[in-house]
């Protein structure tokens, strides 16, 4: 692989972490999850950061984590679903490697997140309506920064990772 990094973006519940780990194994490179890195550095969970600092505080920390992590090379990086909300993050994403937008239907995202207590943006109101709203806001931004778009509905993470590996090779050769 000659690209600097492979960076996975997309909505919560799409499988960025699971697919990212599988892709990193195939490519024989490191895997980093930005949310897990934030929890490691702060010593607290994402919901706790949201409770104490709000979404704005979380997003400020997210900028720092993304900048630090993406300054390295030879990694598969999984980002949080809202990373694309800040212009600074979109710039960093574009400069840091091949950006892959993993996408799935709203119904699939709702099924995958329905029992989660660790997703602060889904803890109030109707989760399905919230996911629909987030996708309306974020879809154009995901598309803006993506080099590749991959649909994940009803496919195994391993299948998606192999498909991504092939797509990245094609992308590098164009």
Image: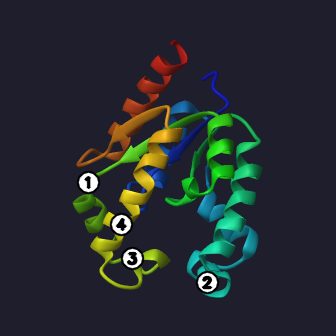
**Are the residues at dot 1 and dot 4 in contact (C-beta closer than 8 Å)?**
no
Q: Earlier in the sequence, mark 4 or mark 3?
A: 3
Q: Nearer the viewer, residue 91 or 5?
A: 91
C-alpha gap between disc 1 and disc 4? 13 Å
Q: Which residue is mark 1?
A: 105
Tell me the number on the disc at residue 116: 3
Q: Nearer the viewer, residue 73 or 120?
A: 120
Residue at the (51%, 13%) spot, across then down: 174
Tell me the number on the disc at residue 48: 2
Viewer-nearest of labels 1 and 4? Answer: 4
The answer, for residue 52, to whether it is visible in the render is: yes
Q: Which residue is mark 4?
A: 133
The local crowd at label 4, few if under 14, some if 14 to 19, many if 20 or more residues have their Cα within 10 Å, is: few
Question: For numbered disc 1, what is the local secondary structure?
Answer: loop
Q: Earlier in the sequence, mark 1 or mark 2?
A: 2
Question: For numbered disc 2, what is the local secondary structure?
Answer: helix
Which residue is farthest top? Answer: 173
**Are the residues at dot 2 and dot 4 in contact (C-beta closer than 8 Å)?**
no
C-alpha gap between disc 4 and disc 3? 18 Å
Viewer-nearest of labels 1 and 3? Answer: 1
Image check: 80 left or right of 166? right
Residue at the (42%, 59%) spot, across then down: 137
Query: Vertical placement of 110 versus 91: above or below?
Result: below
Q: Position of residue 121 (x, y in %)?
A: 46, 75
Q: Earlier in the sequence, mark 1 or mark 3?
A: 1
Q: Quadrant of the N terminus?
A: top right
Query: Vertical placement of 127 versus 133: above or below?
Result: below
Viewer-nearest of labels 2 and 4? Answer: 4
Tell me the number on the disc at residue 2: none
Viewer-nearest of labels 4 and 3? Answer: 4
């Amino acid at each position: 692989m000659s690209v600097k990094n492979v960076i996975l973006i997309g909505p919560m519940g799409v499988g960025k972490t699971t697919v990212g780990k599988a892709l990193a194994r195939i490519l024989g490179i490191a895997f980093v999850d930005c949310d897990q890195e934030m929890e490691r550095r702060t010593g607290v969970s994402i919901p706790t950061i949201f409770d104490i600092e709000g979404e704005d505080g979380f997003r400020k920390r997210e900028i720092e984590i993304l900048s630090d992590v993406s300054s390295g090379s030879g990694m598969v990086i999984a980002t949080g679903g809202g990373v694309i909300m800040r212009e600074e993050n979109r710039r960093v994403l574009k400069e840091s490697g091949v950006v892959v937008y993993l996408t799935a239907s709203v119904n699939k995202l709702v099924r995958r997140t329905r029992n989660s207590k660790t997703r602060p943006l889904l803890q109030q109101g109707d989760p399905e309506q919230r996911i629909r709203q987030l996708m309306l806001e974020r879809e154009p931004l995901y598309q803006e920064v993506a080099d590749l778009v991959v649909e994940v509905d009803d496919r195994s993470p391993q299948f998606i990772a192999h498909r991504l590996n092939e797509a990245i090779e094609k992308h590098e050769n164009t």
